[in-house]
Image (cartoon, helix red, strand yellow):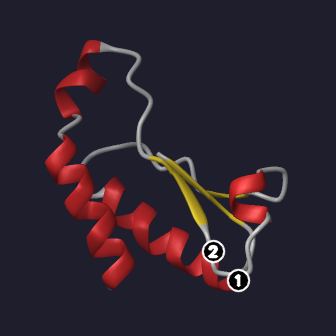
Amino acid sequence: AEVFAVSPKGCQLASKVLAEIVKLGFFNRGVKSGSHLYVVNATDAPAILIEPCFVSSPKDMQLYDAEKMACAIVAGLTA
């Protein structure tokens, strides 16, 4: 899992969301600069882009649960 952000507030949100996703058992690839990404760079509001997982093996497929992932993201955003 990795989360892209640009602003300080976005990085703060990204860290919280990433921490919740990692609790589900996904590998922490870190908070990364999204300065090259239009979706997080061209807004006045704090913005993040979440890459929750990379499903590239049967283990990844078994680990992924959309409901748990959504709950983890909400928990990170509301912490």
Tell me the SS state at disc 1: helix
- 6, above or below 56, in the image: below
Q: Amino acid at mark 2?
A: Cys
In this rendering, position of residue 15 left or right of residue 74 = right
Q: Residue at x 47, y 50 (%)?
A: 28
- Residue furthest toward the right? 36
Please name the residue shown 63% across and 79% down the image: 46
What residue type is disc 1 on? Answer: Pro
Across and down, in percent, residue 7 comes to 73, 78
**Dot 2: within a 10 Å radius of its alpha carbon, few (fewer than 14), some, or many (20 or more) residues?**
many
Residue 8 drawn at (x, y percent): 70, 83
The residue that mark 2 highlights is 11
Q: Are marks 1 and 2 in contact (CB under 8 Å)?
A: yes
Left or right? Give the position of 21 relative to 13. Answer: left
Q: How many marks?
A: 2
Q: Can you tell which mark lies on residue 79?
A: none
Left or right of 69 in this view: 1: right
- Please state, as top left, top right, bottom left or bottom right, where the C terminus lies in the image: bottom left
Between 49 and 58, the residue placed more toward the observer is 49
Image-quadrant location for residue 70: bottom left
Q: What distance separates the C-alpha of mark 1 from that of mark 2?
A: 5 Å
User: Which residue is denoted by mark 1 in the rendering?
Assistant: 8
Picture coordinates of residue 51 (x, y %)?
50, 45
Name the residue at 51% across, 77% down.
13
